[in-house]
Image (cartoon, helix red, strand yellow):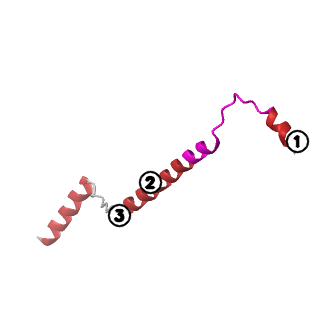
Amino acid sequence: MTHMATLAKELDENKVTPGVLGFLVFAALAVGVWALMKSMNRHMGRVNFEEEPEPETAGASKKQAGGSAA
């Protein structure tokens, strides 16, 4: 027990540490970022993105389709 009292006396009372409040704020931010990333991942999965063909390829395919039908 006396050893703990010696350690407590060695601590600088002018030194500021984050403590429990700092940890709780950091943990809340981490949970918030995790929730936002999960939500973004879910929304990105719902996106239905179909790429349009390049103009050169589209023009060539229309000529081929039109030429074979005529």
Dot 2 or dot 3, earlier in sequence: 2
Give the magenta-colored segment's residue range: 10-26
In the drawing, does residue 56 fall left or right of residue 17? left
Q: Which residue is mark 2?
A: 36
- Residue at 15 percent of width and 67 percent of height: 67
- Residue at 64 percent of width and 41 percent of height: 19
The spot of residue 55 in percent (x, y) is: 24, 53
- As helix, strand or loop, the secondary structure at mark 3 comes to helix
Can you say which quadrant of the picture contains the N terminus?
top right
Relative to 48, residue 16 above or below: above
In the drawing, does residue 11 fall left or right of residue 16? right
Q: Which residue is mark 3?
A: 46
Crowd band around label 3 with a 10 angstrom C-alpha radius: few (<14), some (14–19), many (20+): few
Crowd band around label 1 with a 10 angstrom C-alpha radius: few (<14), some (14–19), many (20+): few
Crowd band around label 2 with a 10 angstrom C-alpha radius: few (<14), some (14–19), many (20+): few
Q: Which residue is mark 1?
A: 3
Relative to 27, residue 47 above or below: below
Nearest-to-viewer mark from 2 and 3: 2
- Residue at 85 percent of width and 37 percent of height: 6
Q: CA distance from mark 2 to mark 1?
A: 46 Å
Nearest-to-viewer mark from 3 and 1: 1
Can you say which quadrant of the picture contains the C terminus?
bottom left
The spot of residue 58 in percent (x, y) is: 23, 58
Residue 22 falls in which quadrant of the image? top right
In the drawing, does residue 50 fall left or right of residue 41? left
Q: Amino acid at mark 2?
A: Leu
Q: Is residue 7 magenta?
A: no
The spot of residue 42 in percent (x, y) is: 40, 62
The spot of residue 24 in percent (x, y) is: 57, 48
